[in-house]
Image (cartoon, rainbow, N blue to C red):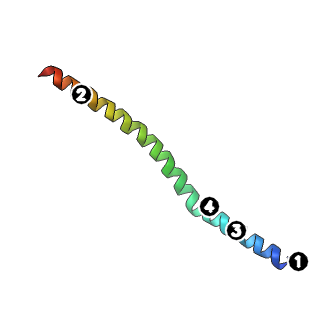
Amino acid sequence: MLSSENCQLYSSVYKWITILGNFGFPICISIYLLIRFEKKIDNLGEIISQLTEVIKEKR
């Protein structure tokens, strides 16, 4: 039989597992996507800089 203290501990652990299950996955996916998009945005910035240089040379 579980004591009242153990029951509260299990309840608390269950709440944390539920919170991590509900929010942990979306947070991980968001961080992953931000990292990937950051690299692509940096790459696009470099390409735009190169294009402006080409346009300046053509004038």
CB of mark 4 within 8 Å of CB of mark 1?
Answer: no
Name which residue lies at 51% across and 51% down.
Answer: 29
Name which residue lies at 47% across and 42% down.
Answer: 35
Marks 1 and 3 sit apart, C-alpha to C-alpha, by 18 Å
Amino acid type, residue under disc 4 in the picture: Leu
User: What is the crowding at mark 2: few (fewer than 14 residues within 10 Å), some, or many (at least 20)?
Assistant: few
Of circles 2 and 1, the one toward us is: 2
Of circles 4 and 1, the one toward us is: 4
Q: Earlier in the sequence, mark 4 or mark 1?
A: 1
What is the number of callouts on the image?
A: 4
In the picture of the structure, the residue carrying the numbered disc 3 is: 14
The image shows residue 49 at horizontal and vertical percentages of: 27, 29
In the picture of the structure, the residue carrying the numbered disc 4 is: 20
Amino acid type, residue under disc 1 in the picture: Met
In the picture of the structure, the residue carrying the numbered disc 2 is: 51
Q: Residue furthest top?
A: 57
